[in-house]
Amino acid sequence: MEGYLIILNNYLHDVATAMIISLTLLMTYIARQVDENSSPKEKQFFIKIYRYFSRLAVISLVWILAGGIPRVIAFNRYELLPAELKGIVPVLIFKHFILFGLVFAGILIWRRIKRKAVKMG
């Protein structure tokens, strides 16, 4: 049973990572569409979406941090060992490196979007 829970946790951890990346991409696109010359209705939409997406991003980030604890504890048994048996350890390392970098970049981008949202709001 433990194995199923760890695998489910790892899957949801990856989904939370994908959520942050997706929300950041969507919010970046929306933020680029709105500027000082936008209508009040467009600015209001931007602020509303920003607040909603921010809540989702925070929930995802909390899950990444909380779900990362059991993932790290069980990493050798449920990720590293199977990757060794398949000969794909470099791919596993690359995957985690890329995902960490994308989440970190997302946090930095989100800070820029927040400044724009504060300025608009």
Image: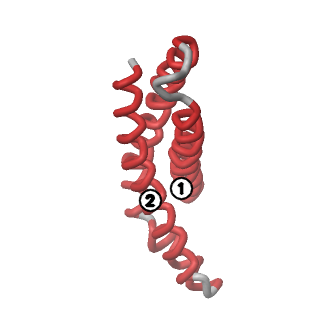
Q: Which residue is mark 2?
A: 71
Q: Is residue 7 above or below residue 97?
A: above
Residue at 51% from the left image edge and 15% from the top image edge: 44
User: Does residue 68 appear left or right of residue 32 in this picture?
Assistant: left
Specify which label sits upstream in the sequence, 2 or 1: 1
Of residues 117 and 9, which is closer to you in this image?
117
Question: Quadrant location of the C terminus?
Answer: top left
- Residue 11, above or below 111: below
Image coordinates for residue 62, horizontal then vertical, percent: 39, 40
SS at mark 1? Answer: helix
Q: Amino acid at mark 1?
A: Asn
Q: Which residue is the site of mark 1?
A: 10
Q: Amino acid at mark 2?
A: Arg
Local packing at callout 2 (Cα closer than 10 Å; few below 14, some 14-19, many 20+) is: some
Q: Is residue 23 left or right of residue 97?
A: right
Residue that appears at 57% across and 18% down:
42
